[in-house]
Image (cartoon, rainbow, N blue to C red):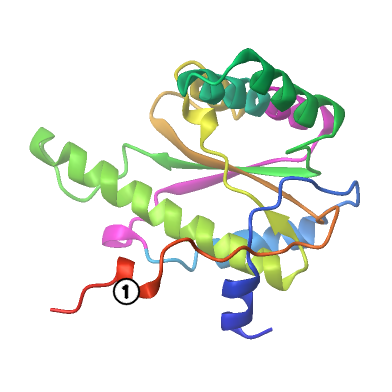
Amino acid sequence: MELGDAIFERTSVRYFSEKEVSEEQVRALIEAAVRAPTASGLENWLFVVFKSEEAREEIYALIAKGMEAYYRAVNLPEEKIEKLRERIYREGMFRAPVYIAVFIDRRVRFLRGKEFDDLEFIWSVESAAMAIQNLMLKAVELGLGTVYIGVTNFPGIEEEVRVLAGLDENYYLVGVIPVGYPRTEPKPRKRKKAFEEVTRFI
């Protein structure tokens, strides 16, 4: 598969089949992820793979909790929240055979001094985000689907994910990525904004 094909075929997949994702495939995803640019060459990312049934059920419950918190944060009516619950619990939205949580280690940094705390944090998150993109593009090549989950960063939920991963407060969760074979054929959607709207030449 050409890189351009992977880029334009990638789309968010929220419903997965029960077909197993092999450890070899997971390894291929993470090996692609760590080829991303990394600020100051620090590679201060950590990929925690939730593959056991027990761990997956716990992560799934935390994603559902985060989605409900998100809907409430934007003041959606209760009937919308009930429809969300139906999509999650009855239709299996976000239920996947593998979840990969991507963390950064705040202790690993290049610039010392509190005045650089924010900058170092931003650089680390950007590095992990680029790694996630690599992982998602590799998934397309392997015939797998992915979706970025950010709602696990709501207060209280992130801490639960971190504890489930066996990590302390030095680690920050950048995102959780469900991985699996799409239940139906993915159909990438066009972007809403045109090239001219998002580009400026100087």
Residue 45 shown in magenta = yes
Quadrant where the C terminus sits is: bottom left
Q: How many marks?
A: 1
Residue 199 picture location, percent across and down: 28, 72
Residue under the image location 22 percent in, 73 percent down: 200
When asked about the image quadrant of residue 50, the answer is: top right
Residue 89 in view in this figure:
yes
Q: Is residue 80 left or right of residue 38?
A: right
When asked about the image quadrant of residue 145, the answer is: bottom right
Q: Is residue 155 left or right of residue 92?
A: left
Residue under the image location 35 percent in, 53 percent down: 126
Element marked by disc 1: helix
Residue 16 shown in magenta = no
Quadrant where the N terminus sits is: bottom right
Position of residue 88 relative to residue 43, above or below, is: above
Residue 31 in view in this figure:
no
Residue 142 picture location, percent across and down: 75, 69
Residue 82 picture location, percent across and down: 72, 18
Residue position marked by numbered label 1 in the rendering: 196
| Nearer to the camera, 146 or 14 | 14
Categorize mark 1 by other alpha carbons within 10 Å: few (<14), some (14-19), many (20+).
few
The part of the chain drawn in magenta is 38-61
Which residue is the extreme one toward the right?
A: 19
Residue type at tag 1: Glu
Position of residue 145 relative to residue 98, above or below, is: below
When asked about the image quadrant of residue 10, the answer is: bottom right
Position of residue 116 relative to residue 193, above or below, is: above
Residue under the image location 85 percent in, 34 percent down: 91
| Nearer to the camera, 146 or 189 | 189
Residue 8 picture location, percent across and down: 59, 73
